[in-house]
Amino acid sequence: MKLFNLLTPGTTLLTPNRRLSAALTVQFQEYQVKQNKSCWQTPDILPLQSWLQRTWQELAAKNLSEKNYYLLSSHQEMILWEEILAKMPEHDYLLQISATAELAKSAWGLLKQWRIDVHDPILSQTEDSKTFQKWAREISKVYTQNHWLDASSLADVIEHSILQNEIQLPSEIILFGFTEITPQQNHLLSAYENAGTRITHYKSERSADTVSKISLIDEDAEIRTMAGWAKSIYQSSQRDLRAYSIGCVIPNLEKLRDTALKIFSDVFSENHTFTLDPTLLPFNISAGKSLASYPIIHTALALLGLSDKPITIEIFSNLLRSPFLGHAEQEQLKRAYFDGRLRNANVTTVKLEKLLHPNDPAKLTASCPALARRLTRYLAHLTNIKKSLPLSAWAKHFIELLTLLGWPGERSLNSQEYQVTQRWLEILTEFSTYDSILPSQSFSAALNYLTQITTKTIFQIQTPEAPIQIVGVLEAVELPFEHLWVMGLDDSQWPGAPKPNPFIPQQLQKKLHMPHATAERELIYCTELTEQLKNSAKHVIFSHALKNDDADLRPSSLLQKIVETNIEAIQIKLSDSPAKVILSEQQLDTLIDNLAPEITDHAAIRGGINIFKLQAACPFKAFAELRLHARKLETPTIGLRALDRGIIAHKALELIWLEIKNSETLNSLDPNELTSIIHHSAEQAIEATTGEKITSQRYLTLELRRLEKLLSQWLEIEKQRPAFKVLFQEYEKNTSMGQIPLTLRVDRIDQLEDGTQIIIDYKTGKHNEISGWFGERPDEPQLPLYCVTEADNTVGIAFAKINPDKIELIGVSKLHLGIDSIKMLTEVSAAEIKIWSQQLENWHSTLAKLGTDFCHGVADVDPKNKQETCRHCNLHALCRTYENQA
Ligand code: SF4
């Protein structure tokens, strides 16, 4: 290759990015092997920015120039910009300091690259640029006072050193793959040239054999087709391709990284099995993601956020289930159960100090002792740390605190976790150098800086060189591909809309042709890039989507002269995803297994009345929830849940009837007395149920008012009934049905004037109807069950519906009871049997069958009503009923 013949000793090859340098180094080595060489000098190939840094480090090491200058890292520059902005009077009006600092830093970089002096009056043309000029002068002053240097000024410092003869010059600098060179870079290169270095702008002489364009329905289809195309080439080559053979270019790769990774992993997964480790697949994706988004680092930052302040259940629950904590494997189940218990108790925030007390009702110390010990030591260490410390001291404390919590866990880290952790430890080491730019900080401020730096660090997992490269547009130029697919070239994105920097006057940006300044500039730039991409491989395909949501898209005007092609012509074998393949083959593997093991130890059965309700709704649901304990994890909510409101209403009614006892007293009470009884009962019920869980008095007062209103409306209905006496409340009875031992708890049994009784069940939900008592699969089996076990003297059963939408007493009875809303059995259309005694027998046999089925392990996926029953069920993933419908 002609380029490699130019790489003589003393020559430096510069590229615009790291990937092109890496690819050229690999290619150079292959080239040497082909030349039958057994050893060779490593060529000096590196990205321009790295070369500047290396040159500056060499200068600093020799103490030849700028010896007192300190080169700031990108994070340090950002922090300094934020510090400057925070001190400015405009600070009060800035909504997003961090985003503004980022824009200001980028404007500062443009000034440097286009060699505009920060004091130039041209910058005071607009209000925004005037304000920016003030900030830029301030940061320039801070840099000078402290002898700090930022990356955008490096080229100027090196240029100055060349003029001072302080630098060792290379004999030749070759520039390769640059789409444009900034004025600052031009000046630097001229300085080298004037000092005797030969400067060569090298252009490869490749040209494509075929260039075509294809339209696909949307962005997802583009990625999937591109992946299928890459896979077809890879397979037809017998998987024997050199690195960088196939290029897949995605213009906004940072945004589409996760989607692309998922689709490519899906398409390339072999034998219809997914691989969880994409590094085993033949492609490499050139885009990282925020270091803070990797689970192991996310956990470390969350752990450091633990303090004596309340923590939300979401954070605490994540930590309980995280593998990156000490003893996580050993206490895995205990921590999961503890999490479930907190959720069931609707705990929305936890306070560690309280949770760690041995008498705390949640009992963390007894449930997860190893975790409790670690948290106790962590809190003790935290309490002993001084309030304000330099960041280097905080870096040590952060490590110590994490060690006390056992981060990163007991299991060995996989390669990805190891790389991520190493990068984060490097950041912590860099954190120690911040003492020179920031004064001592509090714990929370130091953690805030660490979180910010970690979040802004984009990290890409290192993977072996691969034949298929998924890259962004700028990286693709001059990479040595044989096959290239560039997607996303529709008229809305290529060329993109201009995005001038708001802190530099627009006229100035336009005049100097700064990046993204105008639509014309974007068009020229994209035209140049398209030409370069057209010649970047032997076979090139450009693609564009036809739709973006509802918007119609057209191909970019820059693709006008390129011939159209289609999937058949380029011979792509689009394979279905593993999930689709498995689904399409389901009939081949039918296995009906709807019988669970029979229950032999009936005394151990748990579930009570719920067994009958679930078995009737769907036998699989009863099996999964009651025997496999596959239940939904509760999501705690602020305030009272429907369940809590139901418990409070039950308790309040119990207290009311403990005092009033019968209808005669109810009717004789004067309104004030009744109001007072309702008030006290409701108040006690709320207090007994909420305890210390809810501290907002205003919220509790509103709840109290709401409940009082409901209760007084309900008692008005009770007043209209013929005479009755409340015989039992929360009546407990041990019995059995269909081999199932039961402890029944009946809300209330009323005795009527003739000595007979009706059973009442309070319902605070909206969906309880008397039709739910009848049929072979009753929706509401509890009252029929109570009725058959108390059959002797019972003449009716009723729901007391007490909710803001409907307050009523509805039921069925053997005889007319003088209450219009309680119908005689003969009047109930849902009841097929009209004789009370026969209905009791029918209920008995229906319930006994449901109980026996449950004991025998009948577990068919057979919802009573597919629409309704499954809609309210959380087991879709386990029973896969929807796959069955497909
Ligand atoms: S989702 Fe439907 S079929 Fe599946 S267990 Fe629940 S009720 Fe049964």
Image (tube, rainbow, N blue to C red):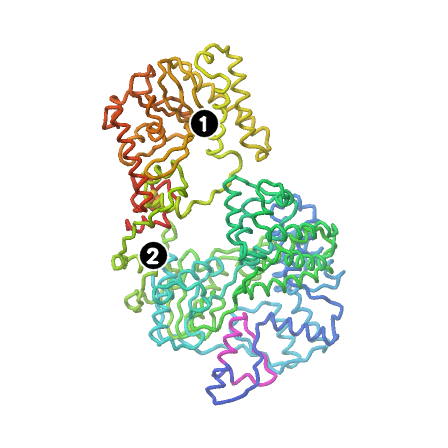
Residue that carries the numbered disc 1 in the rendered image: 730
For the question of whether residue 510 can be seen, the reply is no
Please state if 673 lies on the left or on the right of 245 as rendered. Answer: right
Front residue of this view, candidates 138 and 511: 138
**On screen, residue 477 above or below 99:** below
**Dot 1 surroundings within 10 Å: few (below 14), some, or many (20 or more)?**
some
Residue nearer the viewer, 595 or 866 = 595
What kind of residue is marked 1?
Glu
Residue 670 can be seen, yes or no:
yes
> Residue 77, percent across and down?
66, 59
Indicate the secondary structure of the residue bearing disc 1.
Answer: strand
Image-quarter location of ligand 1: top left
Q: Is residue 31 left or right of residue 381?
A: left
Q: Is residue 866 above or below residue 283?
A: above
Image x and y of residue 210, in percent:
35, 73
Which of pointers 1 and 2 lies earlier in the amino acid sequence?
Answer: 2
Please tell me which residue lies in front, 774 or 217: 774
What residue would you read off at disc 2?
217
The residue under the point 33% across, 19% down is 821
Amino acid on which the number 2 mark rests in the picture: Ile
The image position of residue 542, as x and y in percent, is 38, 65
